[in-house]
């Protein structure tokens, strides 16, 4: 936890931004895997964590802005709980550490909410992403389940996005630690990338590194020789010399701040000349995008810059042709780069994605496109000092997509379909770093990690 004052300041900021009414922030609850008492690893809701610091299941937070009252609803451990899982600090003691002095039993929450609705006072809540939370909010506030998202509070969403988007020095320090653990995971992946090793074995070692640092993964590891598929999770393929191994992973610390890095390495330790050519195209796009980061710049423009760099490289490879800007404007490059350049990062690896990409990554005047490629751009709006973003361009040769476009002769003025055959089994390459937007530009977070093809080759195997 950070200092008590940090949480008090965050809550005061939130109350001032929302203005009036009641804010309901439900924490997460335990979730069962295959029978009730066999539980998934508990993960607290990130907004609940941001404002209370409380990392325990089954807590609910109400802020009555009009009367300046803050209450945690939670049930202290019973003797049965203690017999099975041990004694912990009371909820009262923990809540006091973030400056919340009133703790009431969960059973009293329903009547408190009932009173607010009887008084016709506005209860602000966020769009729920877990069914158990959604059912509760629906019952407590008497809102039909299927209208919950539409009735979520936009002022609350916007206020939280405003606060959580700009990271404080203490948050950046936590993220840098998480990124350093993630860099250790990447190094391990390169060392273990040898012929005959199953993907899951490498992924298992990486997960061990994240857990040995006291936290967990910030998302399920993407470690695959099928890197052409954007999120192909670690599977049972056995690594073979000559293949590319794409590793996209992240550690999350005990504080829950995340890291997210991607490296692509050659199994056996040497890129082929074609792999190196494609690698350098992605690297060039990644470095151009990192160099362009600055406050005031729109992320969508940096995304398009990276797309142009990729397109220029694809033209050198003989896969694309025509005017580069026109090709990108038409979306022809999305045959090879089907997603967005990056996303916000913080307590969530895709920070605040549960609040809605339109609010996190876009503005009232900048709406998300529905076009293939741009519809997967999670962040488009102007950057501000204190944002932390990922920069993760890639080139992905998806046979199913190439066949589909080829059959349609889609964007044939920009794509040389005859040249695609050599890339059917190429796979995919992604390179990802995490950057802090500073007053004048940006700073890549974390310790230096091998990135050029020579640096990667020197570490592989
Ligand atoms: N690193 C996984 C993602 O950004 O979606
Ligand atoms: Mn990412």
Image (spheres, rainbow, N blue to C red):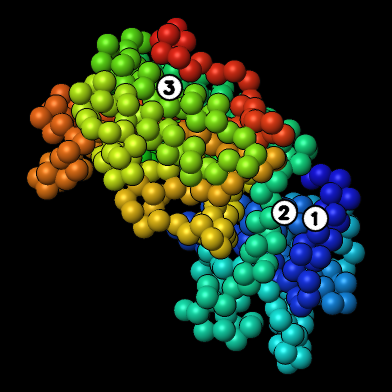
Name which of mark 1 and mark 2 comes first in the sequence: 1
- Residue 340 position, x and y percent, is 42, 43
Residue at (55, 49) in percent of width and height: 381
Side of 112 relative to 223 (left or right): right
**Pointer 2 or 3: first along the chain:** 2
The reply to whether dot 2 and dot 3 touch (C-beta < 8 Å) is no
- The answer as to whether callout 2 falls within 8 Å of ligand 2 is no
Residue 457, located in which quarter of the rendered image?
A: top left
The mark lying in front, picked from 2 and 3, is 3
* Displayed quadrant of residue 452: top left
Marks 1 and 2: CB-CB under 8 Å?
yes
Residue appearing at x 70%, y 71% in the figure: 24
Classify 30 as above or below 273.
below
Q: Which residue is mark 1?
A: 10
User: Within 10 angstroms of label 3, few (less than 14), some, or many (20 or more) residues?
Assistant: some
Relative depth, front residue between 318 and 141: 318
Q: Which mark is residue 243?
A: none
Q: Mark on residue 163?
A: 2
Q: Where does the C terminus fall, quadrant-wise? A: top left
Disc 3: which residue? 284
- Pick whichever, 382 or 88, lies toward us: 382
Left or right of residue 32, residue 46 in this image: right
* Residue 429 appears in view: yes
- The mark closer to the camera, 3 or 1, is 3
Q: Residues within 10 Å of mark 1 (few under 14, many from 20)?
A: some
């Amino acid at each position: 936890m950070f200092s008590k004052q940090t949480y008090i300041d965050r809550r005061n900021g939130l109350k001032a931004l929302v203005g009036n009414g009641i804010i309901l922030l439900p924490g997460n609850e335990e979730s069962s895997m295959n029978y009730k008492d066999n539980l998934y690893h508990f993960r607290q809701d990130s907004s609940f964590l941001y404002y209370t610091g409380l990392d325990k299941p089954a807590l609910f937070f109400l802020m009555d802005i009009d009367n300046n009252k803050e209450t945690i609803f939670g049930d202290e451990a019973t003797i049965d709980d203690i017999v099975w899982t041990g004694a912990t600090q009371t909820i009262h003691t923990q809540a006091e550490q973030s400056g919340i002095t009133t703790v009431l039993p969960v059973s009293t929450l329903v009547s408190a909410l009932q009173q607010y609705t009887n008084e016709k006072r506005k209860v602000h809540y966020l769009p729920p992403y877990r069914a158990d939370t959604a059912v509760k909010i629906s019952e407590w506030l008497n809102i039909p389940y299927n209208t919950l998202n539409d009735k979520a509070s936009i002022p609350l969403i916007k206020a939280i996005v405003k606060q959580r988007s700009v990271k404080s020095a203490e948050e950046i320090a936590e993220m840098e630690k998480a990124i350093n653990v993630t860099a250790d995971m990447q190094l391990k992946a390169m060392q273990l990338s040898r012929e005959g090793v199953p993907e899951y074995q490498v992924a298992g070692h990486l997960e061990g590194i994240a857990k040995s640092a006291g936290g967990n993964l910030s998302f399920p590891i993407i470690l695959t020789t099928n890197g052409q598929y954007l999120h192909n999770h670690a599977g049972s393929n056995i690594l073979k010399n000559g293949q590319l191994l794409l590793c996209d992973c992240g550690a999350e610390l005990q504080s829950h701040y995340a890291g997210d890095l991607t490296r692509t390495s050659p199994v056996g330790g040497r890129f082929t000349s074609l792999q190196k050519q494609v690698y350098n195209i992605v690297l060039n796009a990644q470095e151009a995008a990192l160099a362009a980061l600055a406050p005031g710049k729109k992320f969508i423009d940096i995304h398009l810059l990276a797309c142009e760099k990729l397109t220029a490289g694809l033209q050198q490879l003989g896969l694309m042709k025509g005017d580069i800007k026109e090709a990108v404007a038409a979306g022809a490059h999305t045959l090879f780069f089907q997603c967005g350049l990056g996303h916000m990062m913080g307590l969530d690896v895709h920070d605040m994605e549960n609040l809605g990409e339109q609010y996190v990554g876009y503005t009232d005047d900048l709406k998300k496109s529905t076009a293939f490629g741009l519809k997967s751009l999670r962040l488009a709006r102007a950057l501000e000092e204190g944002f932390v973003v990922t920069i993760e361009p890639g080139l992905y040769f998806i046979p199913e997509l190439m066949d589909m476009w080829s059959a349609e002769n889609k964007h044939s003025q920009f794509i040389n379909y005859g040249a695609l055959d050599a890339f059917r089994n190429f796979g995919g390459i992604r390179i990802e770093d995490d950057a802090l937007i500073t007053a004048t530009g940006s700073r890549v977070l974390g310790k230096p990690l091998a990135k050029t093809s020579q640096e990667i080759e020197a570490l592989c195997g």
